[in-house]
Amino acid sequence: MTARKITIEPVTRIEGHAKVTIHMKEDNTVDRAYMHVNEFRGFEKFCEGRLYFEMPQITARICGICPVSHHLAAAKAGDALSGQTPPRPANLLRELMHMGQVIQSHGMHFFELAGPDLLLGFDANPETRNIIGLINANPDLTVKAVQLRKFGQEIIKTLGGRRIHPVFAIPGGVNKALTLQERDDILKNSDAAIATLRIGLQIIKDWAQKNMEDINKFAVFPTGYFGLTTPDNGLELYDGDIRLIGRDGAQLERFPVANYLDHIQEHVEPWSYLKFPFYKKMGYPDGVYRVGPLGRLNLAEKIDTPLANDELKIFKSLNKGKPVENTLYYHYARLIECLFAVERVSVLCADPDILSTDILNTRKDFKGHGVGVIEAPRGTLIHDYTADEGGKLLKVNLIVSTGHNNWAMSNAVESVAKTYVMGPNVQEGMLNRVEAAIRAYDPCLSCSTHAVGQMPIQLDIVAPDGSLVKTLTRD
């Protein structure tokens, strides 16, 4: 009997393009498994030569799922580069748009991308294991899920003029104030959003109780955790210092966002265009960490809204106060963050400054370099720009949320493949579990793939028996 290779292409219900290769042993168990990010986007290079204040509109086009995250991170980098500190009302409005982004993205992922696995089952027929299957199984819940996403999208549209690729944030502030009527229209839908999230939270808790065996063997491994934090280590999605904790939960670093390159570095593997960030002091792979909902809740010691904070206490009890390492709990953490974002919308709208027209600082103290960081739904997003005295960009560095999680996703793929995939008769549900390991991180692969200089290509020529005949490369 000869060893064989199984290819999953494309990985479904994610944003962007990836494939998985599973290399089987002769005894029909898994030898190795790889997640290959096989798309290339060169935003870092082709932004060079553009003017820094164009970046909030240019980088939003990286992605149609999370354009707000790039839009706001670019504006924050522009603030720092030009030395234009936004007035407080402008920051409130930016954060309000960001909460809309978190709500629409997290809501869509739980109910429409991960939902078919959780609600219909990993082994359900793939023809019905999708949003259509959900509609048939529970039309009332599906409508509520769509309305939740709409709530977030309408916040974005109200502020930015459209749901995708908004025109709103600019260096020094924003270009539109919020009216009283617009604020009231936003608030009238918040109770329904909270009610839907309560349903979602009960769904994931019930599912977890019934599937604890899977939760405890589905890609459970230790890492560090990395993300923004409030001054008192609370959950923070818009602004703050970066905090890094180790596998035991103890703080390793806390630093201003502008100093990120003092602490993290990127590793490269030949089988992926996506880089592998790690904590410099510990090296690769010992210094790998996770970001996103699971990472942020492991970092957070509290949440400054009551309903989400109550859920955080339950989350913290899952591993007796130590970091929660179970990949499938990303889904639970995502809903807690979504609940926080809805509560935060009400807090922001209740602030008198949210209706102020003092929304732009035009006074510049040009620095020529700026870093903007925000917690995108998928994790920490870093925009780093260097410009000449005329404002033309000389260098652009983007470390995108999905990139931070690259090692974790790759490790999860191999872990799940070795746990669930076995031959000789490999079932579709086994392979779907491997895909689900990637989906748990909600990757945005079109955001995350960048390269400097040439794009390498490797061509493997393989014989019918699976042996490698020759490899051709272009560096």
Image (tube, helix red, strand yellow):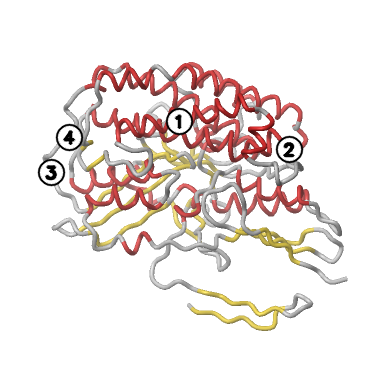
Label drawn at residue 150: 1
Amino acid type of the residue tagged 1 in the rendering = Lys
Q: Earlier in the sequence, mark 3 or mark 2?
A: 2
Tag 3, which secondary structure? loop
Which residue is under mark 3?
A: 364
> Mark 3 and 4 residues: CB-CB less than 8 Å, in contact?
no
User: In terms of depth relative to the viewer, which is nearer, 336 or 287?
Assistant: 336
Label drawn at residue 121: 2
Above or below for 470 versus 306: below
Label drawn at residue 371: none
Marks counted in the figure total: 4
Which residue is under mark 4?
A: 360
Amino acid type of the residue tagged 2 in the rendering = Gly
Amino acid type of the residue tagged 3 in the rendering = Lys
Q: Earlier in the sequence, mark 2 or mark 4?
A: 2
User: In terms of depth relative to the viewer, which is nearer, 410 or 155?
Assistant: 155
Report the Cα–Cα distance between label 2 and label 4. 50 Å
Q: Residue at x 77, y 78 (%)?
A: 464
Report the Cα–Cα distance between label 3 and label 2. 55 Å
Give x and y (percent) for residue 115. 63, 36
Q: Which of marks 3 and 2 is in front?
A: 2
Q: Earlier in the sequence, mark 1 or mark 3?
A: 1
Give x and y (percent) for residue 313. 57, 21
